[in-house]
Image (tube, rainbow, N blue to C red):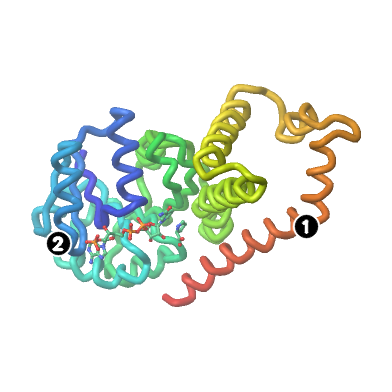
Amino acid sequence: MKIVFYGAGNMASAIFIGMIENKVVKPEDIYLTSKSQKEKIKFFQDKLGVNISYDDSELLKNADYVILASKPQSFPDVAKRLRPYLEEATKIISVMAGTQIKTIRRELKSDNPIARLMPNTNAMVQHSVSGISYSENFPDKDELVELMESFGTTVVVEEDAMHNITAATGSGSAFLYYIYEKYAESLMELGFDENEAMFLTTNLVIGAGKMVEDSDLSFSQLRKNITSKRGTTEAGLDALDGEGIKSILMTTLNAAANRSEELSQDD
Ligand SMILES: NC(=O)C1=CN([C@@H]2O[C@H](COP(=O)(O)OP(=O)(O)OC[C@H]3O[C@@H](n4cnc5c(N)ncnc54)[C@H](OP(=O)(O)O)[C@@H]3O)[C@@H](O)[C@H]2O)C=CC1
Ligand SMILES: O=C(O)[C@@H]1CCC=N1
C-alpha cells in the first residue's frame, strides 16, 4: 500500500499519526510532501519513520491513494504538481472543506476515482467521526472505509450533505474547545487562578467524556442525574436557556455550513 499526503499540516498529521498508532498502515507505506516547510515533514520522518519527498514523479509512482490535505485555496497549486504524474488507478481522497468532486476532477483533468472525506483532528486519538462521499466510479469502497476507520468512525453521505457534516463534526471539536476555553475563563472570573481554572475544566471535560463513553445513558439523562429540584444545577441550566444556548449553537452551525457552501461556490 502506498498512501501519499499532499499537505502534512494539522489535519493530515492527525490522520497519519492515527493510522500509524492503530497499526493499520505501516510508516513506510506513508509518503509526505508539503509546500515549503521541509523541517516540519523531516520531523515526522525522524519521529515516525514515514517517507518524505518533493519529487512528484517519485511520489505518484504506483500510489494507491493520494490524500489532498492542503487548504482549498492551495489546491490549484497542488493540482499542478499532480497533473503530469497522476496514474489512472490512483484513488484521490480529499479532506478539503467545500471543494467539490467535480472541481477536483476539473483541476486534475482526470477521471481518477475520487472520495471526499470530512474528518476531524480527533483522528490523532482514533476518534474522528468522518463523513465520506464518493465519485460514481470509486472502486473498493470497503478498503477505503477500513483505512478511514483506522482513525475513527465513518458515515457515508451524499456530497450535498458534506456542508452539514463539515459544520457538525469537521469544525465541531473546535466549537467544543471554545466552550471549554470560555468555561475556564469564567472560572477565573469566579475567583479561581489560571492553574486552578485549567485543572478544574480539564478534569471536568475528561470526566464528562468518559461518562458519555462508558454509560448507556442519554445526554439528557446524564444531565437529569445531576439536577436536583430547585437546586444549583437547575438554576444554572435555567440561566443557560435564558441566554438562548440552542439558538447560539444553531447560529454557529449554520454559519459553518454556509461557509462550506460559499467555499464550494468559489470553485
Ligand atoms: N484542521 C482541521 O481540523 C480540519 C481540516 N480539514 C481540511 O484539511 C485541509 C488542511 O487543513 P489544515 O491541516 O488545518 O491546514 P494546515 O495549514 O495545517 O496544512 C496545510 C498543508 O498543506 C500544505 N500545502 C500547501 N500548498 C501545498 C502544495 N502546493 N503542495 C503540497 N502541499 C501543500 C502545507 O505545506 P507547508 O506547511 O509547507 O506550507 C501544509 O502542510 C483543509 O482543506 C481543511 O479544509 C478538514 C477537516 C478538519
Ligand atoms: O475550518 C475549516 O475550514 C476546516 C474544515 C473543518 C475544520 N477545519
253 on left or right of 28: right
| Kind of element beneath mark 1 | loop
Give me the residue at 52% from left, 45% from top: 194
Give me the residue at 90% from left, 35% from top: 230
Looking at this view, is 145 or 231 the one in front? 231
Q: Against 239, is 247 above or below?
A: below
Q: Is mark 2 within 8 Å of ligand 1?
A: no
> What residue did someone put label 1 on?
244
Circles 2 and 1, Cβ within 8 Å, touching? The answer is no
| Kind of element beneath mark 2 | loop
**What is the x, y in percent for residue 111?**
30, 62
Give me the residue at 40% from left, 42% from top: 141
Q: Residues within 10 Å of mark 1 (few under 14, many from 20)?
A: few
195 on left or right of 26: right
Give me the residue at 77% from left, 29% from top: 226
Looking at this view, is 67 or 27 the one in front? 27
Looking at this view, is 165 or 220 the one in front? 220
> What residue did someone put label 2 on?
85
Residue lying farthest to the bottom in this orientation: 266
Q: Residues within 10 Å of mark 2 (few under 14, many from 20)?
A: some
Instruction: Classify residue 224 by image quadrant.
Output: top right
**What is the x, y in percent for residue 6?**
24, 57
13 on left or right of 85: right
